[in-house]
Amino acid sequence: MTTLDSTFTFKRGLQLKNRLVIAPMTTKMSFFDGVVTTDELDYYALRSGEVGAFITAAANVHESGKGWEGELGAYDDRFIPGLAKLASAIKKNQTKAILQIFHGGRMTSSKVLGGEQIVAPSAVPAERPNAETPRELSEEEILAIIDGFKQATRRAIEAGFDGVEIHGANTYLLQQFFSPHSNRRTDAWGGTLEKRFKFINEVVDSVTAAVDESGVKNFVVGYRFSPEEYEEPGIRLSDTLYLVDQLAEKPLDYLHLSLNDYRRVSVSEEYKEQSILAYIHDKINGRLPLIGVGDVRTRQDAEAILENAELSAVGRAVLIDPHWAQKVLDNKEDLIRRELSIYDKEELKISNGVWAFLQGMMPERLEE
């Protein structure tokens, strides 16, 4: 049986000291212009040093892709000094730093974009309150965004990160291209399942090319994805199994399944015999390592994920207790902090943005 404290080595050579990873979580702690703040550095540093790797909050690769205020920027060389400080804050006691890169697509607003109209694969608004109708991206703009992912990867390498994670989950632009709800195009970038995969395929190739061209050693590339959508039409687990099958043949280092509960079962009737995590792991069939995640609170949860994944990611539990990982590894679970009080915010480097995130995700574990 795989244990949490065992090491893991990716095919590009990067070794993790254990099987625990801190999942990417929105912090809204950067300056308005995307530059890293001192508070942000303190937040990451406090929670680093115990896990094998720490994946950052999403960093935007193109000016049109900013999803919210306080978001990390990676779309210009001027961000490299701040990103270098962030990588350094994470990389202590052999914890590896992975920068998550993304484009928000239609999941933003013109206010966030300084008055510019939001963009997406097609002019179809998201099914959420007050959603704006996006402008359909031209092919020239699509190619510019693909290059944006490549250049952001170059910047991550220059800043000293150990890898990047392409954020294809949570209904952002990569997922929007794959979804039949948000992608109604009839050109080479949409229509059939294969054509809706084209943007993802090009981004992956662009990012991995940046790594290969740089000559950097032990730098990994991962891809995160969400398994299902509620929209009609929308992504179903059968679509995601196709996606996984394609990605498992790419020069990636890992796949990362985005779930709110690792035990979750598909909404599709034909996929209810086991968890979504198990179906995904079976489809990969050892071709790439998988990171599992979803409401990990205990050692038992983290170990249960390893039954259907190679690495176990934890998120909210580490926000509440920055030393959750070491307490688990040392079999000191009785010492883990389980709830977060507003009086602990300063001590735990919890900003208003993170607090708002927690209020939306786990209000039952907060004490106002």
Image (tube, rainbow, N blue to C red):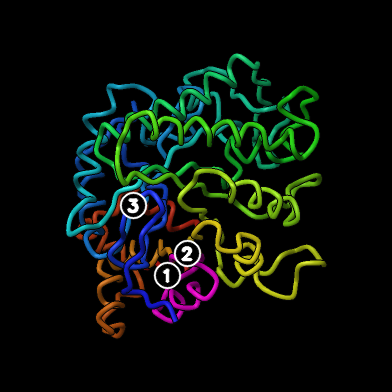
* Front position among marks 3 and 2: 3
Q: Nearer the viewer, residue 30 or 105?
A: 105
Q: Mark 3 highlights which residue?
A: 13
Identified at 80% across, 44% down, the residue is 233
**Residue type marked 2:** Met
Could you tell me residue 266's position as x and y percent? 71, 65
Say which quarter of the image contains residue 155. Answer: top left
Tag 3 secondary structure:
loop
Q: Mark 1 highlights which residue?
A: 365
Tag 1 secondary structure:
helix
Whether residue 361 is in magenta: the answer is no
Q: Mark 2 highlights which residue?
A: 362
**Residue type marked 1:** Arg
**Residue type marked 3:** Gly
Identified at 41% across, 61% down, the residue is 315
Left or right: 281 in relation to 213: right
Mark 1 Cα-neighbour bin, 10 Å: few <14, some 14–19, many ≥20: some
Q: Quadrant of the C terminus?
A: bottom left
Mark 2 Cα-neighbour bin, 10 Å: few <14, some 14–19, many ≥20: few
Could you tell me residue 207's position as x and y percent? 46, 33
Mark 3 Cα-neighbour bin, 10 Å: few <14, some 14–19, many ≥20: few
Mark 3 touches mark 1? (CB < 8 Å): no
Part of the protein shown in magenta: 294-311
Could you tell me residue 215's position as x and y percent? 31, 33
The numbered disc on residue 271 is none
Whether residue 301 is in magenta: the answer is yes
Identified at 24% across, 39% down, the residue is 160
